[in-house]
Amino acid sequence: MDRKLKILVVDDESRMRKLVRDFLVKNNFDVVEAEDGQQALDIFFEDKEIDLIILDVMMPKVDGWEVCKEVRQYSKTPIIMLTAKAEERDELMGFDLGVDEYISKPFSPKILVARVEAILRRANKATSEEMLEAGGIVIDKAAHNVTIDGNPIELSYKEFELLSYFLENKGIALSREKILNNVWNYDYFGDARTIDTHVKKLRGKMGDKGDMIKTIWGMGYKFEG
């Protein structure tokens, strides 16, 4: 029998952890809890079966940013950040560190579960056997790696998803809204600048090949391989 997907919930408020845990357990997830960042890191590096982390930003000892930085050095495990203040600056900083999703408190546990399921669905889909290739760019979805002219490049989870989506839709003009709905996998209520930030970083990592991602002014992007 397949094991249940395991989620690490990290928050210094026990009430919040219980709320999130109860909802996740009800939806057939395994849940492990940590009450501060240090405990979260200890658990994460000890338990190799954690599929996703729900992480509060504001915590004593080691805060959410630190946990995220540390985890990202070794792992692409999806991370959802919980924040009390939805400041765009924080959000962009989070995406820079490799946060996959952002949810500001107070939130509906139903929405949280829906986003958890969407991210895990994408993560599992990305592991299906599939190779994408265009103009010297090769994406191996099963191994989750990308090479350009034979040289590996390091991409964050979201950058990988974004590049895969571009290659899957080569030559098609994609609106920002369409990219958000497909790569972020739900109706995103944030700002389209999230995409622009990711595209800019992705182009930078792709070197000369970054020019294959064309900007369509006032609309979105098109990948021409």
Image (cartoon, helix red, strand yellow):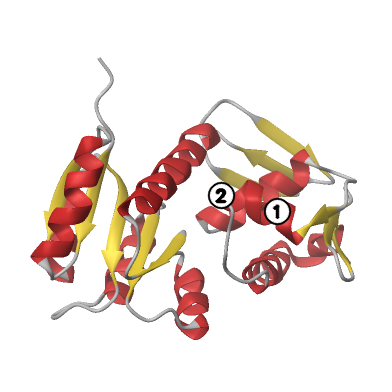
Asked which quadrant contains residue 29, the reply is top left
Identify which residue, 170 or 195, lies in the foreground: 195
Question: Which badge, 1 or 2, is on the more N-terminal residue?
Answer: 1
Which residue in the structure is indicated by mark 2?
Answer: 186
Residue at 80% over, 46% down: 136
User: Within 10 angstroms of label 1, few (less than 14), some, or many (20 or more) residues?
Assistant: some
Which label is found at residue 62? none
Identify which residue, 128 or 35, lies in the foreground: 35
Is residue 37 shown left or right of residue 144? left
- Mark 2 lies on a secondary structure that is loop
Amino acid type at image mark 2 = Tyr
Residue 153 showing in the rendered view? no
Residue 175 showing in the rendered view? yes
- Mark 1 lies on a secondary structure that is helix
Residue 44, compared with residue 15, is above or below; it is above
Where does residue 220 sit, x and y in percent of width and height? 81, 62
User: Within 10 angstroms of label 2, few (less than 14), some, or many (20 or more) residues?
Assistant: few
Asked which quadrant contains residue 36, the reply is bottom left
Amino acid type at image mark 1 = Ile
Return the residue found at the far top. 1
Where does residue 8 sit, x and y in percent of width and height? 22, 51
State the count of labels.
2
Label 1 – label 2 distance at C-alpha: 10 Å
Residue at 35% over, 46% down: 113
Where does residue 123 sit, x and y in percent of width and height? 47, 40
Is residue 23 shown left or right of residue 152? left
* Quadrant in which the N terminus appears: top left
Residue at 46% over, 83% down: 87
Which residue in the structure is indicated by mark 1?
Answer: 179
Residue at 88% over, 46% down: 172
Where does residue 193 sit, x and y in percent of width and height? 66, 73
